Image (spheres, rainbow, N blue to C red):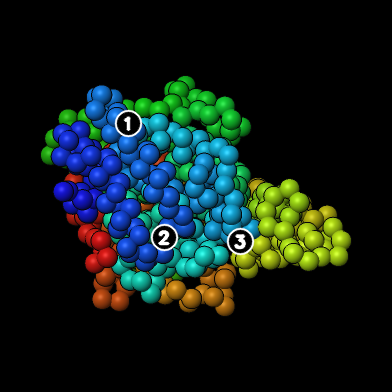
Amino acid sequence: MPSLSQFRSIQALGAALRSRQISATELATDALRTAHQHPDPNVFLHIDDDLTLAQAQAADQALAHDRAGPLTGIPIAHKDLFVTQGWRTTAASRMLANYVSPFDATVVSQLQQAGAVSLGKLSCDEFAMGSGNENSAFGSVQNPWDTQRIPGGSSGGSAAAVAAGLVLGATGTDTGGSVRQPAAYCGVSGIKPTYGTVSRYGIIAYASSLDQAGPLARSAQDLVPLLDAMSGFDPQDSTSLESCDGQANAQGRVQADYTAAQARFQAAGALPLQGLRIGVPREFFNEGLADDVGAAIEAALQTFESLGAVRVDISLPRTRLAIPAYYVIAPAEASSNLSRYDGVRYGHRADSYTDLADMTSRSRTEGFGDEVRRRILVGTYVLSHGYYDAYYLQAQRVRRMIADDFQRALSQDCDVIMGPVTPTTARLIGDNRQDPIADWLSDIYTLGVSLAGLPGMSIPCGFGGPGARLPIGLQIIGRYFDEGHLLALADRYQQVTDWHQHTPEYA
């Protein structure tokens, strides 16, 4: 009987399901068996065989009646920030250790309606706060390429599950780079869409003006049906966009834009990307960038040039200010969002206390991990009387200037921006335990995109680190609502390279 490990793409597996080479139930049974037999790299927080098999049986019914779409029967899994009926939703925190939601997040229900079969919930940094997936209350996730190293965060469980071949697609959230960074470290593809194009309803909030859901998969081609199913206006989300530049923000838009871009490339002939201007920010190639990462990015840029693209030197002068701006704004919003977890309305309640204030204090101290407490304290401080103007408002002004830098470059100088996702390859688990700020610095190339609300993605472009066996990611940044074009560009690159086809020994 065919198994999940035999299929390297959603497209190939979808064809096998539609031709009845394998059933969705057989596929789900095989995937569940693998997930149970190989608990490393510690990616799943909750699996429920009955729930998964029920979805698989519904997919088989759709296949039998020729109602199958591109995701029908495809095994996926959800980051543990998306609330789900049946499966626990913990945000990888003791604060919500046994929480089961009475409803599904919009993204979860949209993917289920598209026929995807969920295997369960994937680990992440606690409340999405971290860059290494070491902050989970249930243990660190391991990078399948080297189990002594981090997979990146906060969507490290999602990236590791795809890299290890446990699923063909996974959901993640990206607040400051939390889809793109783990995708880069784990050698998979991931995209953060324009803020507001994917509903945040049912995603446990970290920083509401920054959080955005996005998918991870092996290739850009596999990301298209996932993002297409996830996208669309949601009246339950006040930040969801009803239209974008006069075009409806609806399911089908990403696929349509991707197909149109592919048609243009095909019509261009031998130089499919002729006329494309790639902006390369000089601030992304500074002393902090490791030589092996820089070399891989340079080789990728040369590949795009061989396809007809033109490299343009650009400047994003406020790149370094993205770190202080983000680490004022995001903790401030986190401080507000997490105030609801007080042991009364939501979350863990301490067993012993003297009064209401003591109960709240003890419950939050016991329920939250170190990094979450750290960010709550920072956020509360910058929002406090006497510091709000000096820190929070200043950070918001800088945010606007960072967005203006991107807008100026993308409207005047170039069509897309490319560069590294991270300064280095994945570090060892525990390396920054005594210096959490060092982890914050690893986000320098991704934070500006999130602050500006632009779409950005990571695709594999080489290997580096010890023995040249750790993945490196190329970041592609586009104009607002340009996800289909970005995915088509990434797919064109992946048609002439094979970095995305490499798999770790685990898989």
Residue at horizontal 33%, vertical 53%?
A: 32
Residue under label 3, please give it: 94
* Percent position of residue 397, x then y: 65, 47
Residue for point 30% across, 56% down = 33
Report helix, strand or loop for mark 3. Answer: helix
Q: With 247 as the anchor, is 236 left or right in this view?
A: right
Q: Position of residue 303 (x, y in %)?
A: 21, 52
- Placement of 72 over or under 39, stated as above or below: above
Q: Looking at numbered disc 2 in the image, what kind of residue is underneath it? A: Val
Circle nearer the N terminus (2, 1): 2
Q: Earlier in the sequence, mark 3 or mark 1?
A: 3
The part of the image, by quadrant, that contains residue 426 is bottom left
For residue 43, which numbered disc appears in the image? Answer: 2
Mark 1 closeness class: few <14, some 14–19, many ≥20 residues within 10 Å: many
Cα distance between the residues tagged 2 and 1: 29 Å
Q: Which mark is residue 255?
A: 1
Q: Secondary structure at mark 1?
A: helix
Q: Position of residue 480 (x, y in %)?
A: 45, 36
Whether the residues at callouts 2 and 1 have beta carbons within 8 Å, the answer is no
Q: Nearer the viewer, residue 291 or 165?
A: 165
Mark 2 crowd level (few <14, some 14–19, many ≥20, 10 Å Cα)? many
- Classed neighbour count for the residue bearing mark 3: other residues with Cα under 10 Å, few (<14), some (14–19), many (≥20): many
Image-based side of 314 in relation to 350, left or right: left
Label 2: element kind: loop
- Report whether 338 appears left or right of 149: right
Amino acid identity at mark 3: Arg
State if disc 2 and disc 3 touch (CB < 8 Å): no
Give how far apart the Cα atoms at labels 3 and 2 are: 17 Å
Nearer the viewer's eye, disc 2 or disc 1?
2
